[in-house]
Image: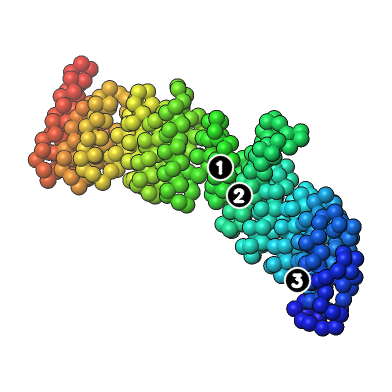
Amino acid sequence: ASAGRAGGGGGGGGGSSGDLVAQLASRVGSVRLAAMEALGKLPPAELEVHLQTIVATLEDQEWQVRAAAAASLGALRAAASQSVAAALARCSEDRQARLREACARAMGRLGVSEAAPRLGELLEDADQDVRREASRALGLLGPSPAAAPAAQRLAHSSAEVRAAAQRALLDAKRRVEQIGEEAAPGFSAAALAATLQTLRAHTEPLLTHAEPDARRAAAEVLQRLGATQGDRDLAVRCAVAVLHDASEEVRLGALNELAALGADMCGGGLGEAAATALAGCLADDAPEVRRAAVRAIAQAARAGAAPAVAELLPHSLQHVRRAAVAALVAMEGEAKDSHIVQIHLALLKDSSPQARCGAVESIAGLGAEGRLSPEEVAAVAGLRIDPHWAVRRAAAEALRQFGPEAVRRHAAEVDQLLLDSDWRGRRSAAAARAEEQAAAKREAGSG
C-alpha cells in the first residue's frame, strides 16, 4: 500500500515508543510513515533501544518510510556502527532521489568513515540535491575519510560533480577548524596540520592530470584550502597547472600570478619546469595571453625559459614567432645574445617589410663577423624574391658584407638582384659583384 494512502490499522503516530514500533508492522504505509516520523522525534537515548528495528525499516516497501528511517538513524551518532553505515549505503542505491538524499545526510551525521566510499559515489548522482548532501556528508566525516573519494571526483568529466567534490574537500577542512574552535579533547594544532596535509596529499597529484578541468579543480581547491600560503613551490605548480585552461581569464590569472611569484624570487626565477610551461603560452591563441606570457617570462622565468622560447622561433605561425622574439628580447643579457641570430632569422619570415628589412640589416653585421652558418646565409640570399624592394636591397647589401666567398656561393641570387626592378637593389648587387671580382683578381695575382 502507498505511504500516502489511508487504510486499516489506525492513524498511527501516537503513544509510547513501544506503541510506535508496533505500528511499524502495520499493513498501511501511511501508518508506518507516521510512526517512523514520530520515532525520529524521540530523544536519541530512547531511540537507540529500537536501533535494529529502525535499520530493518530501511527495507520497507515504501520509499517515504525508508527515508524517515534513514533520518532517524542519522540522529543516533552514539550508536553509529559499520553495519548501520552499510545498511544506509545499500538503501542509498534506491531509484528515488529523495531517499538517496536522506541516506547521504544520515551517513554524514553518523560520522562513520566506512560510509565515505559510497558518499563519493553519490557525488556523481544525477540529482543535484543528492550531490550537495553527499558533499556535506563527506565534509562532516573529516579529511581522512573524505580526501580520497572526493579528490578522485575532481577528475570527473562533469563540472557539477567536480564542484561537489570541491565542496566536500573544503567542508572537510572547515570540519577540522570547527573541532579546533570547539577545543575538543585531544585536539592540537599539530593534529589540524596533519589532517589538512591529508587533503593536500590526495589533491596535489591532480595538478599534473591529463585533463585541464581536473588540474583546474585541484588547483582551485588547494588555493582555497590555503595550502599555497607560505608554500611558493605549490603556488607555482597550481598556477602552471592551469596555464592551458579553456578559460582565457584563468590563463591570464595564472600568468599574472607566476609573474608576481617570480618577481619575488631573487636570482633563479621560477625553475626550469615552470619556465618551460610559460614558454608554451607564447603559442596561445589569445593575443592578450601571449602578451602576458612575454611579461611573465621577463619578470619571472628569465634566462631559464630561453631554450624553450628559442624552440618557438621557427614556428609556422607568425604570432608565435613574434611572441618568442619579444620574450627573448625582453630577457636581455646572455639569454638574448646567445639567440640573437635565431631571433633575426625568425623575423625574416615576418609579414612586416620593416621587420624583415631590420632583421636582414642586423644579420648582415653578424655575417660579417663570421657568426652565420652557410644555411643562415642562404636564408638571407633567398630574400632576392621578396615582394618589397627595401628587403631585396638589404639582402644584396648583406651578401656584400658577408664577403666575396658568399657572393660566389650565391652567384645566381646576385645575378637575379642585378636585374631587380628597383635601382637601389641593382646598385647594391653590382657593388657586391664588383667587390667579389676585385677579390678574385687579387687572389689570381697573388697565385
Q: Are marks 2 and 1 in contact (CB under 8 Å)?
A: yes
Q: Amino acid at mark 3?
A: Gln
* Dot 1: element: helix
Residue 136: give its label.
none
Residue 64: give its label.
3
Q: List the residue tagged with mark 1.
A: 224
Residue 166: give its label.
2
Residue 202 rendering spot, x and y as whole percentages: 67, 42
Residue 98 rendering spot, x and y as whole percentages: 69, 67
Instruction: Indicate the quadrant containing the C terminus: top left, top right, bottom left or bottom right.
Output: top left
Query: In the picture provided, is 77 more to the left or to the right than 442?
Result: right
Seen at 55% across and 40% down, the residue is: 223
Q: Residues within 10 Å of mark 3 (few under 14, many from 20)?
A: many
Query: In the picture provided, is 190 more to the left or to the right than 38?
Result: left
Seen at 20% across and 40% down, the residue is: 354
* Dot 3: element: helix
Q: Nearer the viewer, mark 1 or mark 3?
A: 3
Q: Which residue is situated farthest in the left direction here?
A: 423
Q: Which residue is situated farthest in the front direction here?
A: 15
The residues bearing labels 2 and 1 have C-alpha atoms spaced at a distance of 10 Å
| Viewer can see residue 234 | yes
Q: Amino acid at mark 1?
A: Arg
Q: Are marks 1 and 3 in contact (CB under 8 Å)?
A: no
Residue 58's quadrant in the figure? bottom right
Front-most of residues 22 and 275: 22
Q: Nearer the viewer, mark 3 or mark 2?
A: 3
| Viewer can see residue 148 | no
Query: In the picture provided, is 440 more to the left or to the right than 139?
Result: left
The residues bearing labels 3 and 2 have C-alpha atoms spaced at a distance of 30 Å
Residue 268 rendering spot, x and y as whole percentages: 47, 24
Seen at 33% across and 46% down, the residue is: 318
Front-most of residues 60 and 436: 60
